[in-house]
Image (tube, rainbow, N blue to C red):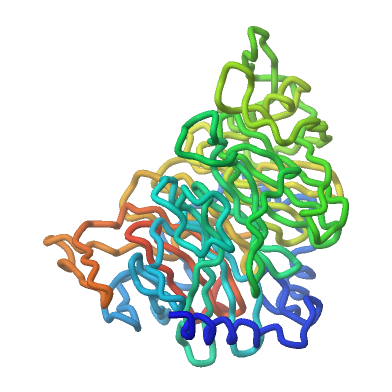
Amino acid sequence: MSLRHDDHLDIFRELTQGESAGHMDPHWSFSRRGFLKSSVAGSAALAMPFAALSGKANAVSLPYSPDYGPLAPVADEATGLPLLQLPAGFKYWSFGWTGDIMSDGRPTPAVHDGMAVVASDANKIVLVRNHEQGGTSGSFASPKVTYDAACDGGTTTLMFAPRLEQWVGAYASISGTIRNCAGGPTPWNSWITCEETSNGTHTGSAYTKQHGYCFDVPAVGAARPVPLTDMGCFSHEAVAVDPVTGIIYETEDSTPSGFYRFIPNMPGNPAAGGRLQMMRLAAAHNASITLLGTSYGYFNTGAAGMVAGMSWDVDWVDIDEPNKPFVSGTSYGGVRAQGLVQGASSIVRGEGCWYGNGVIYVCSTSGGSARQGQIFAYDPRRETFTLVFESSGASVVNNPDNIAWSPRGSLILCEDGSRSPQMLHGLTLDGTVFPFCANNMNFSASGMGSYTRPSGRVFGNNYTGSEVAGATFHNEWLFFNIQSPGVTFAVTGPWDNGAL
């Protein structure tokens, strides 16, 4: 086992041999040329993104992209099974099914979630993938990269060879964490993985350490299972790094939830500590929360009556105790409470977060009048927070979660709702939303029938309603996960025909 693992790690080391981060492709998952092209094309959108550009109050929802065309089942190049519905001309390769034996000899963990490209060269693409496991069955990785030996969440690192159109392998990169839901790629070629919890010894005797933290997982080499405590102890969801300033923006999956920024003491090195702040908008209070017997008002951006194009000025309040997991007498909420008592604002279930086009895009999974989700754009140069999209119903977009910026200047939205099938949607700069991919993984008797992997694991259920997660682009490739049964996909095709 160790020889196979060492051989595999040698491939990963070769990726960055003799290279600094400045010589590697940027973390936002496409080439410098593509980034510059999209930045120039989208520069006019900074002040008034998406629907606000054309003065539309609501996004235009299409049954499919007029450029890519309608969706239909497409056979997987790896298994031959029609696992996805895609437009004509697109093809894909599945990989890393739950239970598959990885290059280090360990079985692939379950519950695939957030993911991103973290490094690349012409021949290889490295991704780090979250596993949102929240149990206490024990770490799936080696003790060297384990935080709390009782816990089974963590990340795996994957490699894909684009010229060969094939997956190379994977290995366990950090574990001993809880509910690694999302996170975000960094300009220093790593993945910050986030725990969506604030559990710890105060909530259960099975835990040996406090949880609710972020961890930095490098593209190559061993991760340090040391929490970034100054980034806060709360129900983390995603992060996005502004490459201009090095400031890290953070979302919180809770209701109410804060939108935070972490100002590092040393940009590019969050382990060196820094200052945590929570966003406050210049808006009248429309909600309240009672903390220790006192009611505090705040502005809830997810309330009914918001309209795409609304924008608010931003300032920030300091979080003096970022490592405070709970309010006295409760088991959670210690960080957000510090912001709310200062009038900080809230989004409803803050989830996806991604840097693109010079702004930080933020997803509110359950916000809006229909409670089907909103997308906001925070402009760090102008200090504004703008509602750029709100879903009017589950048939439009059903509770978006993870989001990512595409090389062609649009957003891709991953659904985490109740309808079946769950989908990936494109959202363009003019406010047009359309389905791009649908989950077609039905292994029940009424679908494809049961399917057995080489590992011996049998899949026999209908998974079409399972969450789509972890979308991330690199040039002509889109990678994403279906959380259950736990599969990763690499998709390519005629991207230039449309907005994604």
Where's residue 158, x and y in %?
A: 52, 74
Quadrant (top left/top right/bottom left/bottom right) for the C terminus: bottom right
Where's residue 387, x and y in %?
A: 66, 42
Where's residue 436, x and y in %?
A: 45, 65
Where residue 332 sits, quadrant-wise, is top right
Q: Nearer the viewer, residue 346 or 186?
A: 186
Where's residue 20, x and y in %?
A: 79, 80
In-image side of 294 versus 489 (left or right)? right
**From what the image shows, is residue 349 above or below residue 180?**
above
Q: Residue furthest left?
A: 445
Q: Residue at x 71, y 78 (%)?
A: 25
Q: Nearer the viewer, residue 461 or 56?
A: 461
**From what the image shows, is residue 483 above or below residue 337?**
below
Q: How many marks?
A: 0
Q: Residue at x 58, y 86 (%)?
A: 11
Where residue 77 sits, quadrant-wise, is bottom left
Quadrant (top left/top right/bottom left/bottom right) for the N terminus: bottom left
**From what the image shows, is residue 438 above or below residue 24?**
above
In-image side of 74 versus 154 (left or right)? left
In-image side of 353 versus 433 (left or right)? right
User: Is residue 5 in view from this perspective?
Assistant: yes
Q: Nearer the viewer, residue 471 or 182?
A: 182
